[in-house]
Image: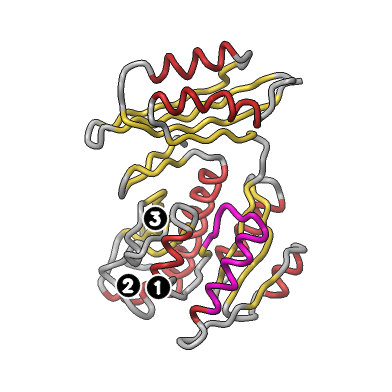
Amino acid sequence: MTDQYVLTISCPDKQGIVHAVSSYLFITGCNIEDSQQFGDRDTGLFFMRVHFSAEAPVTVEKLRASFAAVGDSFQMDWQIHRADERMRVVLMVSKFGHCLNDLLFRSSIGALPVEIVAVVSNHTDFAELAASYDIPFRHIPVTKDTKAAAEAELLELVERENVELVVLARYMQVLSDDLCKQLSGRIINIHHSFLPSFKGAKPYHQAHARGVKLIGATAHYVTADLDEGPIIEQEVERVGHEVTPDQLVAIGRDVECQALARAVKWHAERRILLNGRRTVVFA
């Protein structure tokens, strides 16, 4: 029986990268199951994701050690992981639980390749929901005076539990620049796509008042620039004049769940590579 692995690469684009990677896998007795690649002419960078299989005595540790020379020769930023490895994730939420509930359910039925190690919230509203999925719940209240201590507690949890991804499933606290930098490329957020047109309270009601015909949601990585991080996925739904504000809210919640779930799934399957302020998504 073979083991499955995923290799991801980003590096300056030049001749010979694909040949070097495929030759390495052939020499080490591996078989390519699927390969995707993209060369960005604007940035001059090359991106690649290879799903491959190998039989013992090949291990992920041996693969990483032997691939280092190939990576160095092309100045690669690369990673090799077992394909069946479930990414350790923390979900964060405030008072809107639709995205949290959706991610918990998808994880419970195996639709997301993640291990949710904790639900973190600045409120206690969803402690019972987390418990119903047998997921530890951590209440970390946040005030202006305790923000630094709260973020330090979150970081301690991330480090102790070897968390690879933090998901803001409608977590409504703004993270500090320092926390964004420390977890760069490891925090995903969801917001309604009306930003920046409909800021503030009740954005769907504002949209209804303006007679919008499309509503949507955007999943993106978190940066110090509020809601302006690299976009991973977007979803939209067409609406008509007869739709009420409450119906817009309900439709918007479904759209948010769909976009966020896809973003989390793709990140956990290591299908997303950062390309400056953009992303390359091998979906």
The amino acid marked with disc number 3 is: Glu
Q: Which mark is residue 69?
A: none
172 vs 39, left or right, is right
Label 2, residues with CA under 10 Å away: few <14, some 14-19, many ≥20? many
Q: Nearer the viewer, residue 216 or 274?
A: 274
Q: Is residue 158 above or below residue 172?
A: above
Question: Which residue is found at the position 34% from the left and 61% from the top?
Answer: 193
Question: Which residue is found at the position 44% from the left and 16% from the top?
Answer: 20
Q: Which residue is mark 3?
A: 237
Q: Is residue 112 above or below residue 160?
A: above
Label 1, residues with CA under 10 Å away: few <14, some 14-19, many ≥20? some
The amino acid marked with disc number 2 is: His
**Magenta segment boundaries in residue numbering:** 149-167
Instruction: Measure the alpha-carbon separation of dots 3 and 2.
Output: 14 Å
Question: Which residue is found at the position 39% from the left and 20% from the top?
Answer: 17
Residue 37, given in percent of the width and then of the height, sits at 40, 27
First in sequence: mark 3 or mark 2? 2
Label 3, residues with CA under 10 Å away: few <14, some 14-19, many ≥20? some
| Callout 2: SS | helix
Q: State yes or no: discs 2 and 1 in contact (Cβ < 8 Å).
A: yes
First in sequence: mark 2 or mark 1? 2
Q: Which residue is mark 2?
A: 208
Q: Quadrant of the N terminus?
A: top right
230 vs 2, left or right, is left
Q: Nearer the viewer, mark 2 or mark 1?
A: 2
Q: Nearer the viewer, residue 1 or 261?
A: 1
Q: Nearer the viewer, residue 258 or 163?
A: 163
Q: Is residue 92 above or below residue 234?
A: below
Q: Which residue is mark 1?
A: 244
154 vs 132, left or right, is left
The quarter of the picture where residue 160 lies is bottom right
